[in-house]
Image (cartoon, helix red, strand yellow):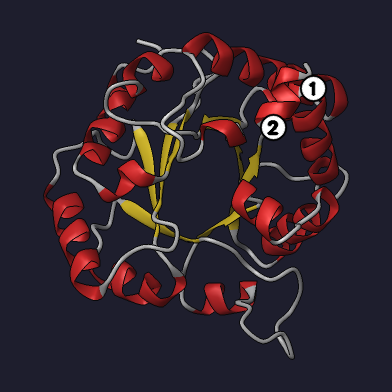
Amino acid sequence: MARKFFVGGNWKCNGTVAEVNKIVKLLNEADVPSEDVVEVVISPPFVFLPQVKAVLRSDFAVAAQNAWVRKGGAYTGEISAEMLINLEIPWVILGHSERRALLKESNEFVADKVAYALSQGLKVIACIGETLEQRGAGETLNVVSEQTKAIAEKIKDWSNVVLAYEPVWAIGTGKVATPVQAQEVHADLRSWLATNVSSDVAEPVRIIYGGSVNAGNCVELAGQPDVDGFLVGGASLKAEFVDIIRSALVSKS
């Protein structure tokens, strides 16, 4: 089954009004593959979501970087799935390693977030990944399968889920998993899904790679059979993000 290439740009906690306008102008003027080749989703900070959505080209979608685990209410500082739906924001990133590490979000908490967001009609980029210590101990597959298992125990329909494998040791460090390393984990994850969920889920679900993706390494990574795209951090704030989107043209070619 052909899986449409997916490229997400996670701006994290960056940007000003002027900088956002500059990035969006660059994206709007970029010559990139059509929607039938690549799905592009841009994730600015919450405060810029309406601004970006209002002016971003129609073939790109917008994502939030997080959402609360249940209906809104007395949860100061949180953003609910219902609010995102009201703003017509279709996607949300959940379980990013920075939130797992800094805010102590557990596998179960992330899974609850994923389930609730899906129940409210959002599409989810669900992040998983191991630390350097866990990789060194040979625990990579155990870690990412446990993270995925927690989600699998809470949801039945995977059609609106993209799994983002982001090795923690490669995020923002300049280090990057080799194409062989990335393919190995993606293939193992797909095999785990086939065995523990179903082949009907494993085959179509998109598993994307994140971790210091840039214009220099994206083409070789995109050519791996089980790498279905990227979740891009720092490079999504630069002109090279356009080159990363264009790597969809060489994917599996």
**Which percent across, then down, holds residue 87?**
46, 77
* Residue linked to disc 2: 130
Which residue is located at x 74 percent, y 90 percent? 74
- Asked if 9 appears above or below 208 in the picture, the reply is below
Which residue is located at x 24 percent, y 65 percent? 20
**Which percent across, then down, holds residue 177?**
51, 20
- Asked if 69 appears above or below 134 in the picture, the reply is below
* Residue linked to disc 1: 139
Relative to 88, 156 lies left or right: right
Quadrant in the picture for the C terminus: top left
SS at mark 1 in the image = loop
User: Do residues under tags 2 and 1 come within 8 Å of each other at their CB atoms?
Assistant: yes
**Which percent across, then down, holds residue 17?**
24, 74
- The local crowd at label 1, few if under 14, some if 14 to 19, many if 20 or more residues have their Cα within 10 Å, is some
Q: Amino acid at mark 1?
A: Glu
What is the count of numbered marks?
Answer: 2
Q: Nearer the viewer, residue 245 or 39?
A: 245
Quadrant in the picture for the N terminus: top right
- The local crowd at label 2, few if under 14, some if 14 to 19, many if 20 or more residues have their Cα within 10 Å, is many
**Which percent across, then down, holds residue 96?**
61, 50
Point out the residue furthest to the bottom here. 74
Which residue is located at x 54 percent, y 73 percent? 84
Q: Is residue 5 visible?
A: yes
Closer to the chain start, of discs 2 and 1, is 2
Q: Nearer the viewer, residue 91 or 230?
A: 230
Q: Amino acid at mark 2?
A: Glu
**How many angstroms separate mark 2 from mark 1 (CA)?**
8 Å
Q: Is residue 199 visible?
A: no
